[in-house]
Amino acid sequence: MKRKIIITIAVSILVILFAVGLGSVYVSPVDILSIIGHKVSGSSLPERIADTKVSIIWNLRLPRTLLAFVVGGMLSVSGAIMQSVLKNPLASSYTLGVSAGASLGAGFVFLFGFFLPFIGVLSLPVMGFVFGLGTILVVIAFASRIGGGLENNTIILSGMVISLFANAIVTLMSALEREHMQRLIYWQMGSFSLKDWSTVLILLPVCLIGTLWMLHYNRELDMLTFGEDQARAMGVDTKKVKWVLLITAAAMTGSAISFVGVIGFVDLVAPHIVRKVFGSAHRYVVPMSAVWGGTFMVICDLASRTIVPQQEIPVGAVTALIGAPFFAYIYFSKRERR
């Protein structure tokens, strides 16, 4: 297990260095490390590294790549928790309505110019986060009122109903305000372009705290895999644990997509690969989902900005192109083995 973890982290670092160096101007991994050392510790730069390279790496590619890694990690951890808590391999921010809720919040900002004067440019991410988190609260409250004991199928069904309702409102708003529709559609496809260090510094603490908080519940998550009755018999307050974990997962997802838009399939694909490689113990599933999800997102973002020359395609389209067939393969091959 230790060897697998070391290899995973080493591959992840290599992927990040490769992604940072690749683009219209190639920068070698050695030069990237020199630039990072120069910026962090003030060490001198070799003469071969021009100021333009320093600017490209430090101001553009490095924050963008790190942001992609952080967002991918947050979405993946969130997806792993939702799947474990609800014991459903298709549970995600989509099926529970978090993405639809965040889109609704973004719709108010894009289509109606809704602006919160005391937070300025952060109106969009704040509205996305609040609506995404608010949606999961509505879903859980709705499921609790119907099922009482927060049955897994009731939560998922409630999430799909609320998600469809939120999407219907977004569609109606878009139809009424057609001139702003394109901005909303582009946001819904996700992008890391024009993001700087400020977004990284906001989301990185959220990612670390959220992942550690989830890791704190690894014992309860392991017990829930045996079923709710067995978990309750072992002393787990299943209803309380579900509330805490689903709200934390929704908060992580809402925080991530509120800054970069809706990006799908990372939270479905990465946790399944992690469980296949590292087993189902959540002390490994949670942190390794962050690493695998982050690495997957970095690869997708690299493809989005390099696969078509002189043009960037939405990263959400890339994750769907890679993630959908990959997830279908994992899911159906798993069913055939049963």
Image: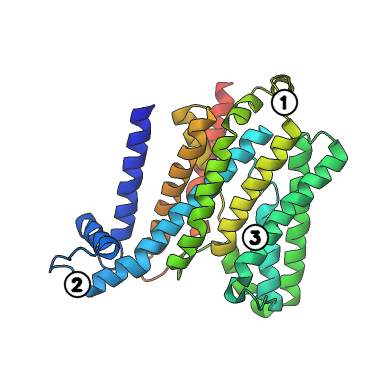
User: Residue shown at 69%/54% (left/top)?
Assistant: 133
Extreme-left residue of the structure: 47
Secondary structure beneath dot 2 equals: loop
Q: Is residue 77 visible?
A: yes
The numbered disc on residue 318 is: none
What colouring does the structure picture have? Answer: rainbow
* Residue 9 vertical placement versus 132 (above, below): above
Q: Residues within 10 Å of mark 3 (few under 14, many from 20)?
A: many
Do labels 2 and 3 touch, CB within 8 Å? no
Q: Is residue 210 above or below residue 88?
A: below
Of labels 1 and 2, earlier in sequence is: 2
Q: Is residue 228 above or below residue 287?
A: above
Q: Nearer the viewer, residue 166 or 176?
A: 166
**Cα–Cα span, label 2 and label 3:** 40 Å
Whether residue 163 is visible to the viewer of this picture, yes or no, is: no
Measured as percent of width and height from the top left, residue 308 is found at 39, 64
On residue 50, which mark appears? 2
Q: Which residue is mark 3?
A: 129
Give the position of the C terminus as an image quadrant.
top right
| Residue at which label 1 appears | 228
Which residue corresponds to the image point at 57% horizontal and 32% vertical from the top-left?
218
The crowd level at tag 2 (other Cα within 10 Å; few <14, some 14-19, many 20+) is few
Mark 3 belongs to which amino acid?
A: Phe
In the depicted view, which residue is nearer to us: 187 or 228? 228
Q: CA distance from mark 1 to mark 2?
A: 60 Å
Residue closer to the observer: 332 or 184: 184
- Helix, strand or loop at mark 3: helix
- Residue 289 left/right relative to 178: left
Residue 20: x, y in percent? 32, 59
Given the image, on which type of amino acid does mark 2 rest? Ala
Residue 35 placed where, x, y %?
A: 25, 63
